[in-house]
């Protein structure tokens, strides 16, 4: 009798639909080159445009950087993160700076807090990609 009850309960719980409130961070698209003010967009996945107002986005703290083994230079703390809906109607995080980026690589951790949780993700941006030439070697 107890086994039948346990089986019935497990089947009932197995078929129960529980809504998942997941947030995903997509790729970072850079609109900047080396020695320019940084501007880029991070695509938000599984987010309705109405949910953007409840998000808080910032650069992760120094402890998160050290746990991830990522260096945290001071100029990263001057980056601005703003969740918004772009002109096409897609939710994105706009990353920008008021100063020119002199390093060819940006490597940073983004922390997103929203009513249903918290997410950390590392991004690496190559600002001045190496060029390839069609010259033949001498």
Image: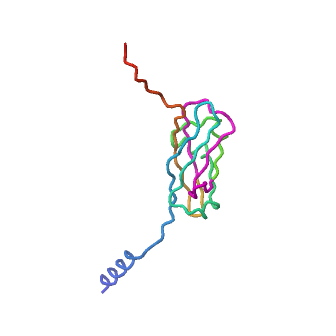
Query: Who is closer to the viewer here, 34 or 116?
Result: 34
> Which quadrant is home to the C terminus?
top left
Counting from the top left corner in percent of width and height, residue 125 is at 53, 38
78 is higher (above) or lower (below) than 8: above
- Image quadrant where residue 40 sits: top right
Q: Is residue 85 magenta?
A: yes
Question: Going 30% across and 84% down the picture, which residue do you hit?
Answer: 4
- Image quadrant where residue 53 sits: bottom right
Taking the view exactly as shown, the residue that stands out farthest to the right is 98
- Image quadrant where residue 136 sits: top left
Q: Which residues are magenta?
A: 83-111
Locate residue 32 relative to residue 14 in the image: left or right. right
The colouring scheme, among rainbow, by chain, secondary structure or one colour, is: rainbow
* Numbered-mark total: 0
25 is higher (above) or lower (below) than 103: below
Question: Going 53% across and 31% down the picture, which residue do you hit?
Answer: 128
Counting from the top left corner in percent of width and height, residue 68 is at 51, 42
> Which quadrant is home to the N terminus?
bottom left
Query: Who is closer to the viewer here, 93 or 75?
Result: 93
Counting from the top left corner in percent of width and height, residue 41 is at 57, 47
72 is higher (above) or lower (below) than 54: above
Q: Is residue 101 magenta?
A: yes
Counting from the top left corner in percent of width and height, residue 60 is at 60, 46
Taking the view exactly as shown, the residue that stands out farthest to the top is 138
Magenta stretch, overall SS = strand
Query: Who is closer to the viewer here, 111 or 43?
Result: 43
């Amino acid at each position: 009798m107890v086994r039948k009850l346990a089986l019935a309960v497990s089947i009932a719980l197995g078929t129960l639909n529980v809504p998942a409130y997941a947030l995903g961070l997509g790729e970072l698209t850079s609109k900047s080159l080396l020695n320019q003010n940084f501007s880029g967009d991070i695509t938000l996945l599984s987010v309705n445009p109405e949910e953007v107002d409840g998000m808080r986005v910032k650069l992760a703290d120094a402890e998160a950087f050290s746990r991830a083994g990522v260096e945290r230079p001071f100029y990263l703390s001057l980056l601005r993160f703003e969740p918004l809906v772009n002109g096409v109607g897609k939710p994105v995080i706009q990353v920008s700076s008021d100063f020119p980026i002199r390093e060819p690589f940006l490597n940073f951790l983004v922390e997103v807090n929203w009513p249903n949780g918290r997410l950390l993700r590392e991004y690496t941006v190559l600002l001045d990609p190496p060029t390839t030439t069609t010259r033949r070697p001498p």
